[in-house]
Image (tube, grey):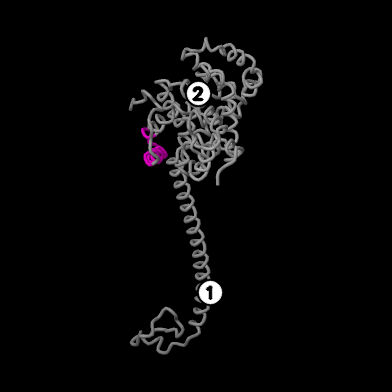
Amino acid sequence: MKNRNLNPGSTKVDPVTLNQWIRKAKKGDIGSYQEIYEVFARKVLNFIYRMVNSPEEAEDLAQETFVAVYQKLDTLKDNSKFEPWLFRIARNFVYQRYRMRSPATVSIDALDEDGQAVTQLVDARKNPDEAFQTAELEDVVAEVISDLPEKYREVFVLSALQHLSYQQIADIIGRSLPSIKTDIHRARLEVRKRVKDYLKV
Amino acid sequence: MTMDCAQCAENMTAYLDGELSASDAERMRLHLSACALCSGELGSLQEAANFIESYRKELEPRLESWNLVRARISQADSFSPFRSLRWRVALATLAITAALALGYLQYQQIQRTALDKYISEYVREREARGKERSILANEIEIPYANNPFIEVKATLVDNPFQSEDR
């Protein structure tokens, strides 16, 4: 068995090669599926992570996603749509997990409503003197993203962090392109408002 | 034609993300070159995007993740081998072959029954005709029947099993 997964997600792949891997994986070639995994594992993991805010849970859901994707691969008609299809499955797992939980423990809605703790964290760091360190700024960015309303966070993560096209995002979320474009713009405005104080540093 | 400020604001993020068509992007550039307000707005959006990009922290998939995914795939396959496309195709082929074979056997059975019926009818008819013929044969007068030096044979004119050249 190959053991090249030292840095999964770091590889770029051209559409022709990806198409070949998908065709082989559909026939049960697990080696080709591993190639696909290595290209997308990191992107999928980080998308889920931004949605659930828990590294352990994100890891578990990412694994579930890749198992399901392999099992459903033969239902994918158009191989060029693989990436949005993959993210759509990941997104379904995220929402499925939240539906199974009681809203009192964790839900995306609860996170939105229960913004006080998060806001306090961000507020505590709003003093620029305390935020010079890179690690702290990384925390600020993480908090800003996690504090976005779910509707904006999702499109922001997919566009600004995972660099998917607007059309792909519309396919993943299942909404029209103009509506996605509007939400992405509003999300960017919201992020700018929240990081404004740090930009002056 | 250039954009106005409202159109420019609406398309600003799409412009930064490279999502505008070439003609819209050109109209946007024209407007930005002439509008300090919009160009300042674009600058601050870009700055915020750069800040996020610079300080975003990403998780790395764990080293053992692929092995876990693979193990879960194998486990799922062993519980349900008919999930893969190859198995489904094989299963469908088997089902079609079985259906065709059953159909063929059924067809043969029907043919055989029809043939049996035809033969039994034919035999019944032939037996009935045989009886009729033996009654007729008894009524034929055979000349020299008692003469030991002359060999005679009784022939039936309407015997369907006797050829004409005999």
Residue drawn at the location 52% of the way across and 76% of the way down: B131
Specify the quadrant that holds the N terminus of chain A: top left
**Viewer-proximal residue, B166 or A113?**
A113
Q: Amino acid at mark 1?
A: Ala
Residue in the image at 36% along x and 23% along y: A6
Q: Is residue B10 above or below residue B159?
A: above
Which residue occupies the extreme bottom position in the image?
A: B143
- Taking B152 as reference, is B16 above or below it? above
- Taking the magenta stretch, the answer to whether it contains residue A31 is yes
Residue B138 % position (x, y)? 49, 82
The secondary structure type at the circle numbered 1 is: helix
Mark 1 burial class by Cα count in 10 Å: few <14, some 14-19, many 20+: few
Q: Main secondary structure of the magenta part?
A: helix
Mark 1 to mark 2: distance in Å?
Answer: 106 Å
Residue B20 in the image: state x and y as whole percent.
51, 41
Where residue B8 sits in the image (x, y, percent)?
A: 57, 38
Q: Name the kind of residue labelled 2 in the image.
A: Ile
Disc 1: host chain:
B
N-term-proximal mark, 1 vs 2: 2
The relative height of residue B82 versus residue A134 in the rendered view (above or below) is below
Q: Quadrant of residue B34?
A: top right
The numbered dot on residue B52 is 2
**Residue A36 % position (x, y):** 40, 33
Disc 1 or disc 2, which is closer to the eye? 2
Front one among B146 and A131: A131
Which residue, given by chain and number where applicable, does mark 1 sit on?
A: B128
Stretch of the chain drawn in magenta? A16-32
| A177 in the magenta segment | no
